[in-house]
Amino acid sequence: MVLGLWLNAMLCFGQLSFEWYNKDKGLLERINFQTGNYESLKVNKDNTFKVQSKLKFYGVKLVDILPNYEVNVFPKGRNRILTVPGTGQVYELDSENKFFKRLDKTIHRGYNFKALQFIENDTLYSLGGTGFWQSNSILTYFDPSYSEWEERLTKGKKPYGIYLNSSGINNGKVFVIDILRHLDNNVSQENTQIFQLDINSKTWSNLGELNKVLLTNNEINSQDFQWSNGHLFFLHSREPIFADVKTNRVFKYNGSRNGFLSYKGRVYISKGWVYTFRNDGKITLDSIRYSELQRNSILLGQLYLTYSKFYNLNGYFLLIALLVIVTALIVAYKIRIRRKVDKENSISASRPKYLDKLLHVYRTNGPDYLITTEELSRIIECDSMAFDTQRQYRSKFISSINTYSLDNFGIADAIFRINHDSDKRFIHYGIKKELFALIDDILV
């Protein structure tokens, strides 16, 4: 009876499996929702999938698994973490205890298709993506304690939008080609910018401008790149071209295996080898040593041009003069601000908007008062907006309050969240007693 309902549900919703390629083991792996099995296929050796284990499913809702969704897979010890971009769904495959479990409780979806997702410092991140007819550069992380995705604020100027196929991470640095600047757009007054995000400091930096002349001369007019281990592969180019992003160099492969780098495959670099995995009706895996690829390639030039390339010597002198003036103004401004800060007992003047309204509510109702999500939306005046927009506004507001409290008073997580006792889907917001004791001083 249960198996019948399971199969009927899969026929209705269409997603028969989660399937991915394990480049470290040379296996095509999948969760078969029709049979409930974990299965694998040895690429270039086996013709069919073989059952590895029967799985127990926990919290997996078939109605949430829509057709044609691809998954991202990340190692976690012997286990796997699976995400479905655009849905917020997070799963864990436990190969030792043989279960497949859904970890998230989110009901928000649709804003981060094609997002760059990765694990850094044991934290699962999602950066950018597209949805609702717009792209974004929002950084979110999965909070296991709440089983929800939360926004993580970043510093510095960031790209307009970020896609998986024009970005990648290596050694704690995210490299991003701004997706809103088309390589073949000769009308645009702005060139395509190259950005870098330091995951530890959450700080953006602008590296320069994409070398449009080099890419145009080699007929690279698409941003459908592929990223692997610090390298970009331009698979839609006239000839096999790739870039070593760390050294900022672009190469063209002139060897005999021109068909190796094809847009029909997925390119990986692992343990000194470059692999091309294809699954276009026939599953194949091809490989070449990285040293051979590099030995038979010629240097074309730089991937991006730093801003110093755009100034002559006179421009440098002008820039230095401007920097001296700006530095003097900044120093004078900082001295003035420092005096003002000292006068106000070291309380920062850059107070988050709506902070006073929030603190008045807590002062009126006492330190044990819990504010509901609806009440918080009214406080920050976003209650008339769409539900997803309200949630983003609330998350940004709480993050700004906690940053302000930590910077000025050394109080971490001054405004904290707790689940409702009777319904875990609803969140309440409380205030730490240390911050409550300072309300009168802050509101002066």
Image (spheres, grey):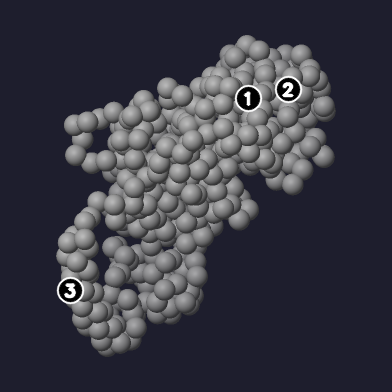
The residue singled out by tag 1 in the image is 277
The residue lying toward the viewer, choosing from 353 and 429, is 353
Label 2–label 1 contact, CB within 8 A: yes
Residue 325 — which label? Answer: 3
The residue lying toward the viewer, choosing from 317 and 230, is 317
Mark-to-mark CA distance, 3 and 1: 55 Å
**Secondary-structure class at tag 1:** strand
Position of residue 162 relative to residue 29, above or below, is below
Residue drawn at 82 percent across, 27 percent down:
52
In the rendered image, the quadrant that contains the N terminus is: top right
Q: Residues within 10 Å of mark 1 (few under 14, many from 20)?
A: many
- Total labels: the figure holds 3
Residue 118, percent across and down? 56, 44
Q: Residues within 10 Å of mark 2 (few under 14, many from 20)?
A: many
Quarter assignment of residue 333: bottom left
Residue drawn at 31 percent across, 40 percent down:
192
The residue singled out by tag 2 in the image is 43
Residue 410 — which label? Answer: none
Residue 100, percent across and down? 72, 34
**Secondary-structure class at tag 2:** loop
